[in-house]
Amino acid sequence: MPVEPRFRDQVRCLVLKDRRAKALNDALSPDDRIAFNDFLVSVAAVLLVPRLGDRCGIEDIAAFSDEVAARHRRERRPVNEFVVEEILREIYGLPLLFRRFPVPPAAVSGAGAAILRYLTNTDAGVAAGIDRILDTAADLHERRTRP
């Protein structure tokens, strides 16, 4: 499934710390949010594999999730580390934490944004290479969502 240009724009704004990111996020309908979250997972995957490797164990995922959540708490941007971990488990094909009760889409958006903010703040190459990252993520997204 092709990525909507506004989703790419929203991620670009988030990474480049453009104030429009919040307005774009607030404008998502419930169905749009689910589609956006699917793309957000693809973007996170593109950014995480170079950092955590192609294969990542549960302990590494939990540690990284804790690191992201701790950084955001210090910035007074609380995020649920279990939702961060859920996204990472999806990326790495590990059993999900929330099988019986799915995570609310808004919580997935917040956790995905926290991952992107963390990676952007710890690696200047993310902002510098955002167009290449978005292109790679769009390709991955289309492969992941192909019927």
Image (cartoon, grey):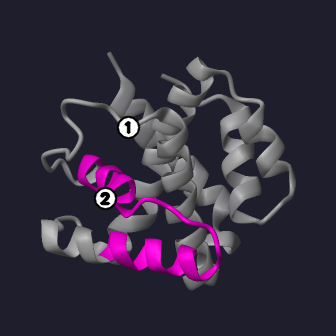
Asked if residue 129 is positioned above or below residue 23 in the image, the reply reads: below
Asked if residue 79 is positioned above or below residue 42 in the image, the reply reads: below
Q: Is residue 57 visible?
A: no
Dot 2: element: helix
Find disc 1 in the rendering and name its residue: 103
Q: Earlier in the sequence, mark 1 or mark 2?
A: 2
Q: Say whether residue 18 is left or right of residue 9.
A: right
Residue 62: x %, y % from top left: 24, 70
Q: Is residue 92 visible?
A: yes
The answer to which quarter of the image holds residue 17 is bottom right
Which residue is at 24% across, 53% downward?
89
Find disc 2 in the rendering and name its residue: 85
Q: Say whether residue 12 is left or right of residue 103.
A: right
What are the residue bounds of the magenta stretch?
64-90
Which residue is at 66% across, 37% downward?
7
The answer to which quarter of the image holds residue 126 is bottom right
Query: Residue 53 lies in magenta, yes or no?
Result: no
Asked if residue 67 is positioned above or below residue 45 in the image, the reply reads: below
Mark 1 Cα within 10 Å, few/some/many (few <14, many 20+)? some
The one nearer the camera, 47 or 64, is 64
Q: Amino acid at mark 2?
A: Glu
Magenta highlight: main SS: helix
